[in-house]
Amino acid sequence: MKSLFSLNLPKDLIPSAKSKDIPVKDWAGAVVFLFVRGNLLLIKRSEDMPSHSGQIAFVGGHKNSNETPTQTAAREFEEETGLSSSILDFVGILEPVKTASRSLIIPCVYQVDMDPEAFIKRLKSNGEWSEAILVPFKDIIQYDRWTFAKSIRIGEKNLIMFYPIMRNSYISSTGSAVKDHLLWGATAKMIWNFFKFYDLNVKSDSTKGES
């Protein structure tokens, strides 16, 4: 059976991810769902940002005209981290997620084969984030650490996911992981969608082993 923690990521996350750009209309932006040797890159948005200030999020942003999702993700990565997008190894695209403002965001999954400590020291904020963190994926996938709430809007019901990122459990760009963080909202939903896909692969591998 394939270990959930091995992170030997498949090249096609969903059937439509066989190409680098999923055919979705009216998408507003893309994020960089980035693994750095088993750690997931997240940022804490600056408190003076006009939207989602202080929240834990992925690197990413709104598309420019005529951009594809991967082009938006690559551009945002370079703008927000100061690093070249050429270091990113593309894996696939996850299903789009709507934000609280109803914007449709596409997660583009990548890997970087670099020492996590060395990687995070190279990041330079463009002012949109105050801290970058690398959280072990083996911790995030512990389902019993997640909590849930229901958000009810007229005509629809949504599940809100929450995951606590505890101090000293992650690598921080500040040099010390002394703060607790709360992961929730669209970012948490994207990660949960990845769990669903990853579990399908685990089940598939397990079935093969039993045949």
Image: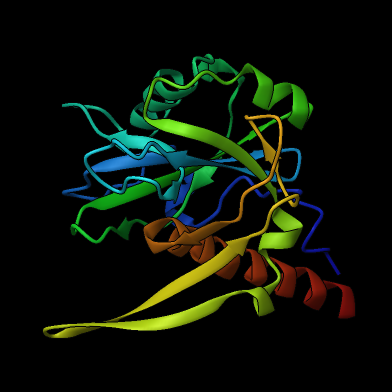
Image quadrant containing the C terminus: bottom right
Vertical comparison of 206 with 78: above or below: below
In terms of depth relative to the viewer, which is nearer, 107 or 204? 107
Vertical comparison of 145 with 37: above or below: below
Residue 114, visible in the rendered structure: no
User: Which residue lies at the image location 48% right of the left edge and 57% below the top edge?
Assistant: 15
Please give the count of numbered marks on the rendered protein. 0
- Left or right of 91: which side holds 6? right
Vertical comparison of 200 with 65: above or below: below
User: Which residue lies at the image location 41% right of the left edge and 50% below the top edge?
Assistant: 55
Q: Residue 181 lies in what quarter of the image?
A: bottom right
> In the image, residue 101 lies at what x, y percent?
18, 57
In terms of depth relative to the viewer, which is nearer, 131 or 36? 131
> In the image, residue 202 lies at what x, y percent?
73, 69
Image quadrant containing the N terminus: bottom right
In the picture as drawn, the residue positioned furthest to the left comes out as 154
> In the image, residue 123 lies at what x, y percent?
57, 21
In terms of depth relative to the viewer, which is nearer, 103 or 80? 80
User: Which residue lies at the image location 78% right of the left edge and 68% below the top edge?
Assistant: 205
